Image (cartoon, rainbow, N blue to C red):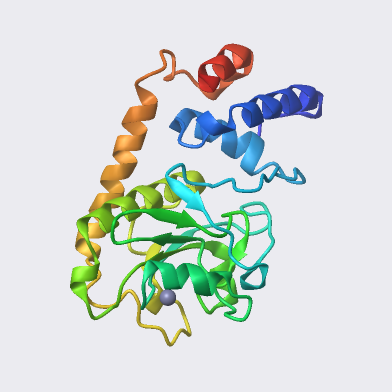
Amino acid sequence: MEETTNDSDRRVGRRALLIGGAAAAVGTAVLARDELARLWWRTPGVEKPRKEGEVDFGGARWVAASSANWRRADRPDDFGVDRVIIHVTQGSFKSAVKVFQDPGHGAAAHYIVGKDGRITQMIRELDVAFHAGNRDFNERSVGIEHEGFVDRPEDFTDAMYEASARLTARICARYDISVDREHIIGHVEVPGTDHTDPGPHWDWDRYIPLVRAAAKRDAERTASPSAGAGTTAASAGTSAAADAAGRGA
Ligand SMILES: [Zn+2]
C-alpha cells in the first residue's frame, strides 16, 4: 500500500519481528492483525514458515491428517479464504481422526471439535483440505467437523458450540470474513453436494451470535492490555521495536 521499494529492508525487519512474535501474535490485536494482513499473510512471494506440530488456533491439539487428504497451498496468498464450512462427522471424535489419517479416505477437514469442546487441528489453514466435495469451496474455505450425528441433537453440546464459536471467530478475524450465514455455511449449502450435514438440529440461530460474542471478547481482550494499542499502523512503523517487545511478552 504505502510501501515503496525503498521500504523493503524495513519490511523484512518487521517481518522478522512478526515471526519472532508469532506465538503472541496468533490471537493478537486487531491492530496487529492489520499489520499481519499487510506485511505477512498477504505479502506475495513470501514463503510462510511451517513447523511440525504448529497449529493455527491456540487451543487446538495437532494430529496430522494423511497428506492424501489435502493439498499443499499458501493461502490466503494463492487462494483467498472467505468461507467457514460446518460439518458433522456422523461418528465419534476418534473415528473422525482415524479416517482423516487414512490415505484411502480421500477427505479430511482442518479441524474436529468434540462434544467435550476439545479441538484437534489436522490440516494447516495454509493448505486446501478436501472436505467440501467442491474444488472451489475447498480452496476458499476452512472446514470444521463436529463430533456426532445429524439426527441426534443431544450430540451438539454447549461445550461444542462454545469451542467451535471461538475457533470460527478467530478464523473470521484472520481472513476478514463477515460473521454471517452467507460466509459461515453448512456442508449442505455447498453447491453440488449430496451431503446433508450439519443437519436440521444444528442451531444456527444460536451459533452465529456465539461466534459474534467470541469475536467481541477477542477484540476487547486484545485492545485493552497494551497502552497505545489505539494508535495507527503508521506509528507502528516507527515504534516497531517497542511494539515487538510488547508482543513477545
Ligand atoms: Zn460434511
Query: Which is nearer the eye, 234 or 142?
Result: 142
Asked where in the image residue 67 lies, by quadrant, the reply is: bottom right
The percent coordinates of residue 240 (x first, y second) are 61, 16
Residue 124 seen by the camera: yes
User: Residue at the spot x=57%, y=72% of the render?
Assistant: 130
The percent coordinates of residue 3 (x first, y second) are 71, 29
Query: Which is nearer the eye, 109 or 11?
Result: 109
Q: Is 222 positioned to the left or the right of 22 in the image?
A: left
The percent coordinates of residue 4 (x first, y second) are 76, 28
User: Residue at the spot x=48%, y=28% of the render?
Assistant: 31
Q: Is 52 positioned to the left or the right of 167 in the image?
A: right
User: Residue at the spot x=35%, y=82% of the render?
Assistant: 196
- Indicate whether 216 appears above or below 72: above
User: Residue at the spot x=56%, y=55% of the render?
Assistant: 125
Exactly how many numbered labels are in the figure? 0
The percent coordinates of residue 54 (x first, y second) are 59, 45
Asked where in the image residue 7 lies, by quadrant, the reply is: top right
Q: Is 172 positioned to the left or the right of 203 in the image?
A: right
Asked where in the image residue 186 lies, by quadrant, the reply is: bottom left
Query: Which is nearer the eye, 70 or 187?
Result: 70
Residue 235 seen by the camera: no
- Image quarter hosting the N terminus: top right
As drawn, which residue projects farthest toward the bottom?
A: 194
Split into quadrants, the picture shows ligand 1 in the one at bottom left
